[in-house]
Image (cartoon, rainbow, N blue to C red):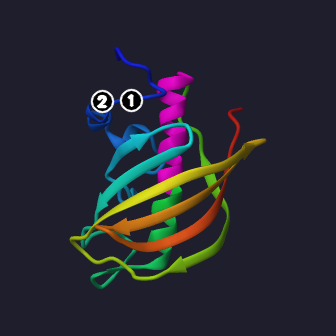
Amino acid sequence: MNEDPRQPSSQFLRTIDIHELLPQQEPFVMIDRLVSFTMERTVTKTTLRADHIFMDGTTFNTSGLVENIAQTCAARIGYINKYILKKGIQLGFIAAVRDMTVLENPHVGDTIETTVDIVAEVMGMTLATGTISCGDKTLVTTNIKIAVKEEA
């Protein structure tokens, strides 16, 4: 990579296989691609498929929305570990979800964009706000806390 990994181009981000950044693997992967990365903000996109395990019929359920936000956090951590710190993937766990508002659930075929803004990182905990949108419509807002397991 010939560019600063802290300010990657969208062209470079398109070359990354999301599976390289996540501890989750199919069929549990709920994001398709990393769209934007800074230390403060990470954005992913996902086109919802009928075979996603969090589909209730044609509707992506609330558990899937939480997991989508958590995996956007995981993609951020995976990117930092792989491209900045040059180390392996770390496991993370959802420690808390607060003030979640679901205005609308997306459906099969929708492409959702998930934005995670980092509020604080302290002692293996990441506090963030998460927003999921579809087109120009906000679907979900929440605060999330992710605990990252330290390497043994």
Q: Position of residue 13 (x, y in %)?
A: 32, 35
Q: Residue furthest front?
A: 136
Q: Is residue 44 magenta?
A: no
Residue at the spot 37% in from the left edge and 55% down from the top edge: 31
Q: Quadrant of residue 110?
A: bottom left
94 vs 127, nearest the viewer:
127
Q: Is residue 73 magenta?
A: yes
- Where, quadrant-wise, is the N terminus in this rendering? top left
Apparent side of residue 122 relative to residue 56 in the rendered image (left or right): right
Neighbor class of circle 2 (other Cα within 10 Å; few <14, some 14-19, many 20+) is: some
For numbered disc 1, what is the local secondary structure? loop
68 vs 24, nearest the viewer:
68
Q: Residue furthest left?
A: 109
Residue at the spot 68% in from the left edge and 43% down from the top edge: 149
Disc 2 marks a residue whose amino acid type is Phe
Q: Residue furthest bottom?
A: 57
Q: Position of residue 74 (x, y in %)?
A: 52, 48
- Give the residues drawn in magenta, as a range: 71-86
In contact (CB < 8 Å): disc 2 and disc 1: yes
Apparent side of residue 117 relative to residue 21 in the rendered image (left or right): right
Apparent side of residue 10 relative to residue 94 in the rendered image (left or right): left
Where 89 sits versus 103, above or below?
above
Residue at the spot 70% in from the left edge and 47% down from the top edge: 120
Task: State the residue position of label 2.
Answer: 12
Residue at the spot 59% in from the left edge and 39% down from the top edge: 90
Q: Which mark is residue 8?
A: 1
